[in-house]
Image: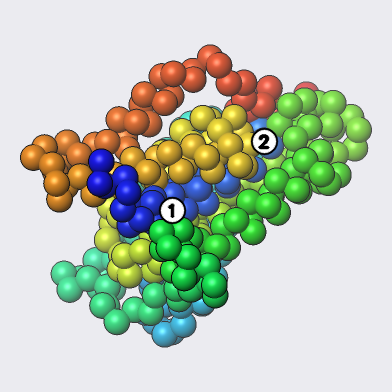
Amino acid sequence: MSIFLDPELWSSTITLTIPIAFAALGGVISERAGVINIALEGKMLIGAFAAVAVDAGTGSVWLGVLAALVAGALTGALHGWATVYLRANHFIAGMAITILAAGITGFLFNSIYGPTGTPGTTASIPVVHIPLVKDIPFVGKIVSGHQVLVYAFFAFAVLVQFALFRTPIGLRLRSVGEFPKAADSAGVRVLLLKFGAVCAAGALAGLGGADISIGILNRFNPDMVAGRGYIALAAMIFGAWKPWGSFGASLLFGFASALSFQLQGVSNLSRNILLMLPYAMTILALAGIVGRTTPPAADGELYDPGR
């Protein structure tokens, strides 16, 4: 029980939640527009590599973050072109993007860095210590002392929540994901909105990848995303396709990850079994909510405005 009274557990929970939450937030945007986003894993991986490569090459961590955002958006554009304009099956296109991302990043990693790996001197995203809050016993150690992208996520979440449910563009985007034919009849540019939503989802997933590579680990390796994109997809479903709901679900999975690391120091269980904890929780969570949450009505629909 002493583990649960350790602020390090809860601080680690927040740290490990944010990469998943960024990708889940992107998934909310994409699927609210009717595009199933199985490709979140690949977009996170592309963003993680772009962040490290540009950071190491320029010495600027902020250019690395920008590169992750742009690389994720471009990957999203490829995904959007395939699913929206070519009307490819969303599941097949998403898996193709993920496989492509794994192949490209693995090839570039081996070609550029080889067996030595990425430079250990790569700049990390700065940590922020919040004045006054940092001095509060217990709470200060949990809330303060995180790197900038952790706090930036909450700004993005507020922005997406407001845009989706309080603005005309959000209403149009949600209508595209529910009844695209009706939206088209009302003059909404359905395909363009879908494409833009997938690009935005890619950008956010790319930031999630950057959070891992230059925010947490300060390096890149080809398997570093380790299924977090799929966990983000589960968090989005568990959160009922809503920004704060997806964050709450991401927090649950982040806690499972943090707990698995903490237990390694005090438990006799195999390390491999403990590392399975967040993935097992994902399966159990999805098993418990299948059929109880309702996706956007046209999610996954191959819309053809000419028909």
Q: Is residue 160 left or right of residue 270?
A: right
Image coordinates of residue 240 in percent, x first then y, are: 59, 29
Q: For this view, does 135 lie left or right of residue 197?
A: left
Q: Which residue is mark 2?
A: 32
Q: Vertical placement of 240 versus 150: above or below?
A: above
List the single residue furthest toward the right. Answer: 186
Residue farthest toward the bottom in the current orientation of the protein: 59
Q: Which residue is disc 1 drawn over?
A: 14
Q: Quadrant of residue 59?
A: bottom left
Q: Is residue 248 visible?
A: yes
For marks 2 and 1, give the one nearer the viewer. 1
Q: Position of residue 256 (x, y in %)?
A: 33, 40
Residue 183 sits in which quadrant?
top right
Check disc 2 and report its element: helix, strand or loop: helix
Q: Give the SS element for disc 1.
A: helix
How packed is label 2: few (under 14 Cα within 10 Å), some, or many (20 or more)? many
Which is more toward the observer, 151 or 181?
151
